[in-house]
């Protein structure tokens, strides 16, 4: 529901060329006899995003709303027009979830200045008034996303102590405007560009907008009747950083090429999670993910109690109390031959936010490739109720993938 685009995820940008290939390769042994290598090697399954039973949007109409004094007005209009024509991108991010085709309405330009500080309740009240009194606003229905693009003079708050461009970069939700009739809307604040060469404020804005549009289409009623909002119960650790919708899991965890320039759109958009690709051991962030895809999957030995994104449950993990350690197996795999071994490391999530590490890691080796197994020892300095998340990181050239896991005391 809340878009959290972390700067680290902008580390590698651009459209990565994809190429197909055989799923076996002959490797010569010491005696010159070649043995077939199977791609991908056996490994634990990647997560799936599950539906809570709510509807998805079929079809989808985006109504862009912006303000005439905004210096980015022309960029907003161009992005909206281009996105509406980028059918391959839209299908690649939404079609497997049953979402329909995308159209973009004529942008609404408002000759008014929004308040400098707006709570989500303020936005809902303002939008209700516009729908009821301004004929340029279409009436709400199950196919329409009202998309409000705010200039950088506006700070948006939601919940308790959550501020735009600090805790979130955007969000989507719905509310009831009349009995039985809900307004689906997305809020796109204007956040600074990340410190990455070639990435602009407009790129930041459009990447976040694409994230929210895809999530609104696959989960239009997150607060009242959620659809694709949660990771499967065995993999709740993947939600411990930023959420379980289709945009969240890629923006938060996959650090290479998540934001890219799809054909026909000049500014950045975001790849989002594909259950089908994850199940097939390909790059789960689509469309046009990189090949060959590689990762290191932990064989998690325990079922532990985790608290993730408001979801409390029992999930796969490592049961450890403070002062204890445990060694687990990492199964390395790729969906095709890589240019060589990749480097394997692990990161306590707390250190990502500048906190002291509760977990440290050691390995019997720190590089490998498809079919290899690495023994990783996890040392827990302090128990934390609800779990301590960490990720396994894989680096090969400019490409990085991760796998989320967690340690919990019970």
Image: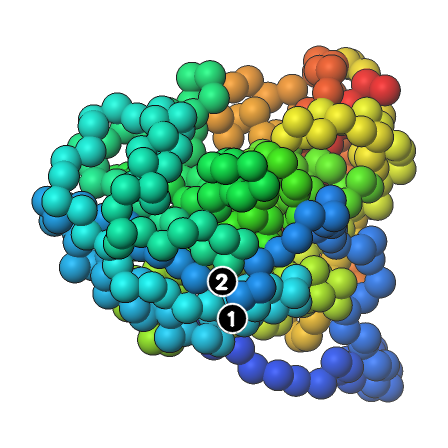
For the C terminus, give its image quadrant: top right
Tell me if label 1 and label 2 are in contact, CB under 8 Å.
Answer: yes
Towards the viewer: 63 or 244: 63
Q: Residue at x 66, y 85 (%)?
A: 21
Q: Residue at x 80, y 55 (%)?
A: 45
According to the picture, the residue beneath numbered tag 2 turns out to be 60
Q: Position of residue 236 (x, y in %)?
A: 73, 37
Towards the viewer: 126 or 116: 126
- Secondary structure found at label 1: loop
Disc 1 to disc 2, C-alpha distance: 6 Å
Q: Earlier in the sequence, mark 1 or mark 2?
A: 2
- Secondary structure found at label 2: strand
* Residue 284, label in figure: none
Towards the viewer: 150 or 169: 150
The answer, for residue 128, to whether it is visible in the render is: yes
Image quadrant assignment for residue 96: bottom right
Q: Is residue 184 left or right of residue 98?
A: left
Q: Position of residue 208 (x, y in %)?
A: 39, 49
Image quadrant assignment for residue 163: top left
Q: Is residue 356 left or right of residue 45?
A: left
Q: Residues within 10 Å of mark 1 (few under 14, many from 20)?
A: some
Q: Residues within 10 Å of mark 2 (few under 14, many from 20)?
A: many
Q: Residue at x 71, y 15 (%)?
A: 384
Q: Position of residue 343 (x, y in %)?
A: 61, 52
- Examine the rendered structure and indicate whether residue 99 appears above or below residue 85: above
Q: Position of residue 93 (x, y in %)?
A: 55, 64
Q: Residue at x 30, y 68 (%)?
A: 81
Q: Is residue 82 left or right of residue 398?
A: left
* Residue 101, label in figure: 1
Snapshot colouring? rainbow
């Amino acid at each position: 529901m809340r878009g959290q685009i972390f700067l680290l995820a902008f580390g590698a940008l651009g459209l990565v060329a994809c190429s197909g290939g055989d799923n076996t390769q002959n490797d010569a042994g010491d005696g010159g006899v070649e043995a077939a290598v199977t791609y991908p090697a056996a490994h634990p399954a990647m997560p799936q995003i599950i539906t809570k039973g709510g509807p998805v949007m079929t079809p989808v109409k985006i109504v862009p709303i912006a303000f005439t004094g905004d210096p980015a007005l022309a960029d907003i209009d161009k992005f909206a027009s281009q996105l509406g024509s980028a059918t391959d991108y839209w299908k690649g991010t939404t079609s497997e979830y049953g979402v329909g085709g995308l159209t973009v309405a004529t942008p609404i330009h408002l000759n008014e200045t929004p308040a400098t500080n707006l709570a989500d309740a303020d936005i809902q009240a303002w939008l209700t008034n516009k729908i009821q009194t301004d004929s340029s606003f279409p009436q709400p229905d199950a196919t329409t996303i009202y998309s409000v693009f705010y200039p950088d003079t506006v700070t948006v708050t939601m919940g308790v102590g959550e501020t735009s461009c600090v805790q979130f970069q955007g969000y989507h939700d719905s509310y009831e405007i009349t009995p039985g009739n809900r307004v689906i809307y997305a809020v796109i604040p204007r956040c600074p560009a990340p410190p990455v060469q070639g990435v602009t404020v407009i790129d930041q804005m459009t990447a976040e907008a694409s994230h929210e549009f895809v999530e609104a289409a696959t989960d239009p009623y997150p607060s009242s009747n959620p659809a694709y909002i949660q990771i499967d119960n065995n993999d709740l650790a993947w939600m411990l950083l930023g959420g379980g919708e289709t945009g969240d899991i890629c923006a938060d965890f996959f650090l290479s090429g998540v934001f890219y320039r799809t054909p026909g759109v000049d500014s950045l958009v975001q790849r989002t999670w594909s259950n089908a690709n994850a199940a097939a051991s390909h790059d789960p962030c689509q469309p046009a993910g990189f090949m060959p895809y590689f990762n290191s999957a932990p064989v998690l030995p325990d079922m532990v109690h985790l608290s993730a994104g408001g979801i409390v449950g029992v999930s796969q993990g490592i049961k450890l109390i403070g002062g204890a350690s445990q060694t687990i197996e990492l199964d390395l795999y790729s969906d095709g031959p890589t240019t060589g071994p990749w480097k394997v490391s692990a990161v306590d999530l707390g250190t990502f936010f500048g906190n002291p590490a509760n977990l440290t890691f050691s390995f019997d080796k720190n590089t490998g490739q498809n079919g290899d197994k690495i023994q990783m020892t996890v040392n827990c300095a302090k128990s934390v109720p609800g779990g301590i998340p960490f990720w396994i990181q894989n680096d090969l050239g400019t490409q990085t993938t991760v796998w989320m896991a967690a340690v919990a005391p019970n």
